[in-house]
Image (spheres, coloured by chain):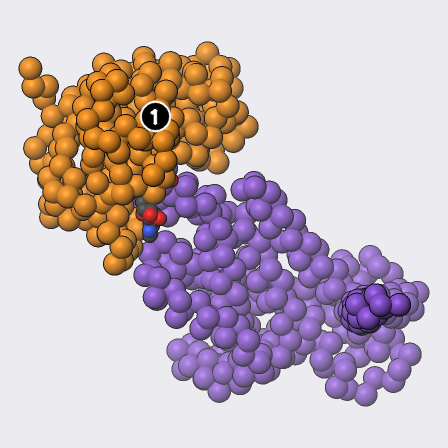
Chain colours: A orange, B purple
């Protein structure tokens, strides 16, 4: 059984200026699975994640080599519009970053710039429901989004990403700024989205990776060390660096 | 006694620190005392003026003729001249300044920004008398060839040059406001597929609006307080006109005119100086306070 690949990197490398940050990474992200990236701080998890929606383009010193294929097409080929890539491959960031606008406008913004015109209200509602936020905010859609709690803000950011109907959702430590209860809800939400979307999530929390992901990739100093089903990676790591990391040994 | 040396050394520092503290306090106090002194003089001399002219006549009258009989002390023509020039200047400086700020903050390369930003700040430091000459020897002659019948003194020339003068201030301060918008908001917008233009116009500018508005108000306040350019270029004809091609007199230009003249101290004409000055002071103070409040609110919203 070889599930269809949604994303695939071929010999992917990234440098910032002269510093190589990730090197020669080749991996595939299978359709409708939750893939976790784990690894020590600074190993390049965010950098790798940001190659999937060309977010690295925003860093003037960043240079990407190799290929990132999305449904077989190279995202870095000439003529590909980064804006189109980012609509199809949504992103949720480490710190909740709602726009300083109303809850409704936070979601409607993405819809409008992507040419949705009719039933904006319905779509806002649908994405708030999908992000498990509707019941908490339906009576105050015009309220300032910055007045929500951090956990609610982060779910709003997920709703905002879902609204434009992406195929893939990239999440860079989406729960790291949240308290344990909000984190739990975030994990529940990812559980609900699982099966409908392809999700790539960076996390520092290994229990979290074990709970929510189907597959896990362990990165170490810019290198992809081990990548397999989450269950197997955690119970039966092959590489000793992986084992050292997941058992919490240093060095 | 063995410990006396380090002890006295630290006491020595403390004395030095106290001295520096006192000096700093004195210089702070000096500027406050000077400001209070100016306000007191403005108020007392104005009181003398308002003993002879009713505030209603002063604030609502439409004829300004303090030296020629029949005398009349309606300040509206001067206010009109001031706001006509300021509005014309704003018409030029606000849109161009904002566009420059958006370009620098959202589109220019880091290198361009690093060159242009300091250049703008240097431009903002050119003495205004230079701008005054620029108005008289370049802008006015050009206007007079383009529009026959325009006088040697006209509001348009002053407005254009004051606009150019406050332009660096608008673009520099607005650029600060745009740069202060957190990068995470830009990422959020790019993340849902916004183009650079959409990010700039629909996210960054609205988020920076209070700061932009503050820079606008500050620039208008500066245009209202501008003296030399308007004295040299706009002339000394107080009037209720909205025609930019005519000569007008601003509050500041009037103050210059009386200061240079020979109105005897204590005469009513001399006292108009302080009444006009007081009004000018109150207008610019109000604008500056408004601008300051907007900046604080802006900072708070991104805490
Ligand atoms: N914009 C940048 N310019 C220069 N170097 C960068 C930049 N962003 C990241 N780096 C460097 O690249 C390396 C990888 O960073 P990255 O953020 O991808 O790591 P990470 O695995 O996500 O770390 P963390 O777990 O702390 O988030 C780090 O050494 C970091 O200092
Ligand atoms: Mg990271």
Is B120 on the left or on the right of B129, as rendered? left
Residue located 89% across and 68% down the image? B1
As drawn, B130 above or below B41: below
Chain ID, mark 1: A
- Is residue B165 shown left or right of residue B80? left
Q: Nearer the viewer, residue A29 or A138?
A: A29
Give the percent coordinates (x, y) of residue B268: 87, 75
- Indicate yes or no: mark 1 CB to ligand 1 under 8 Å: no
Task: Identify the residue shown where x is 32% and y is 61%.
Answer: B109
Q: Which residue is painted at 57% across and 62% down in the image?
A: B219
Q: Is residue B44 left or right of residue B131?
A: right
Q: Quadrant of residue A194?
A: top left
**Whole-percent x and y of residue B184?**
41, 41
Vertical placement of residue A192 versus A142, above or below? above
Quarter of the image where one finds residue B15: bottom right
Q: Position of residue B181 (x, y in %)?
A: 47, 47
User: Is residue B265 at least partly visible in the picture?
Assistant: yes
Residue placed most toward the observer, B287 or B280: B287
Above or below, B237 against B284 in this view is: below
The residue nearer to you, when weighing A204 against B66, is: A204
Residue pictured at 24% horizontal, 43% vertical: A222
Q: Split into 4 quadrants, where in the image is the C terminus of chain B? A: top right
Q: How many marks?
A: 1
Residue A113: percent from left, percent from top = 30, 35
Residue B70 appears in the rendering: no
View extreme (front): residue: B2
Instruction: Identify the element where label 1 is drawn.
Output: loop
Question: Badge 1, how many Cα within 10 Å: few under 14, some, many 20+?
Answer: few
Judging by the rendered image, the residue that carries numbered circle 1 is A247
């Amino acid at each position: 059984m070889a599930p269809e690949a949604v994303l695939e990197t071929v010999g992917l490398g990234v440098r910032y200026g002269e510093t190589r940050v990730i090197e020669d990474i080749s991996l595939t992200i299978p359709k409708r699975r939750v893939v976790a990236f784990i690894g020590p701080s600074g190993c390049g998890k965010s950098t790798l994640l940001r190659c999937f929606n060309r977010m690295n383009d925003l860093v003037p010193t960043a240079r990407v080599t190799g290929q990132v294929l999305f449904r077989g097409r190279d995202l870095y080929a000439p003529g590909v519009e980064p804006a189109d890539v980012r609509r199809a491959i949504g992103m949720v960031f480490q710190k909740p970053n709602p726009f300083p606008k109303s809850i409704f406008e936070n979601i409607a913004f993405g819809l409008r710039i992507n040419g949705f015109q009719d039933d904006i209200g319905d779509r806002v509602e649908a994405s708030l429901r999908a992000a498990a936020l509707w019941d908490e905010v339906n009576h105050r859609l015009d309220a300032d989004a910055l007045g929500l709690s951090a956990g609610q803000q982060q779910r709003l950011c997920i709703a905002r990403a879902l609204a434009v109907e992406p195929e893939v959702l990239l999440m860079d430590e989406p729960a790291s700024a949240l308290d344990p209860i909000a984190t739990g809800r975030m994990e529940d939400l990812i559980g609900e989205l699982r099966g409908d979307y392809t999700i790539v999530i960076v996390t520092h929390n290994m229990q979290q990776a074990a709970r929510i992901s189907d597959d896990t990739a362990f990165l170490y100093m810019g290198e992809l060390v081990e990548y397999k089903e989450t269950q197997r990676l955690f119970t039966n790591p092959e590489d000793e660096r992986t084992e050292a990391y997941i058992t919490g040994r240093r060095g | 006694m063995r410990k006396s040396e380090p002890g006295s050394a630290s006491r020595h520092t403390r004395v030095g620190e106290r001295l520096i503290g006192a000096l700093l306090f004195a210089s702070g106090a000096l500027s406050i005392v000077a400001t209070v002194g100016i306000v007191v003089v403005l108020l007392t001399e104005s009181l003398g003026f308002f003993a002879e002219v009713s505030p209603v006549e002063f604030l609502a009258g439409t004829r300004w003729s303090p030296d020629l009989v029949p005398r009349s002390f309606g300040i509206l023509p001067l206010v009109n001249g001031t706001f006509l020039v300021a509005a014309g200047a704003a018409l030029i400086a606000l849109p161009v300044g904002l566009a420059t700020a958006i370009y620098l903050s959202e589109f220019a390369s880091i290198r361009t920004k690093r060159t242009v930003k300091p250049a703008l700040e240097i431009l903002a430091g050119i003495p205004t008398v230079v701008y005054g000459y620029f108005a008289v020897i370049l802008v006015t002659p050009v206007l007079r060839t383009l529009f026959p019948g325009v006088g040697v003194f006209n509001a348009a020339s002053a407005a254009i040059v004051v606009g150019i003068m406050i332009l660096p201030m608008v673009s520099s301060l607005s650029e600060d406001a745009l740069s202060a918008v957190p990068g995470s908001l830009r990422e959020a917008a790019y993340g849902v597929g916004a183009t650079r233009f959409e990010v700039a116009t629909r996210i960054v500018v609205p988020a920076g609006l209070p700061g932009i508005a503050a820079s606008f108000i500050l620039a208008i306040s500066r245009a209202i307080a501008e003296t030399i350019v308007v004295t040299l270029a706009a002339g000394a004809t107080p009037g209720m006109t909205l025609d930019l091609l005519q000569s007008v007199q601003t509050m500041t230009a009037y103050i210059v005119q009386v200061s240079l003249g020979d109105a005897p101290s204590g005469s009513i004409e001399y006292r108009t100086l302080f009444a006009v000055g007081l009004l000018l002071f109150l207008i610019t103070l109000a604008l500056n306070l408004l601008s300051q409040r907007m900046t604080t609110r802006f900072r708070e919203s991104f805490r």
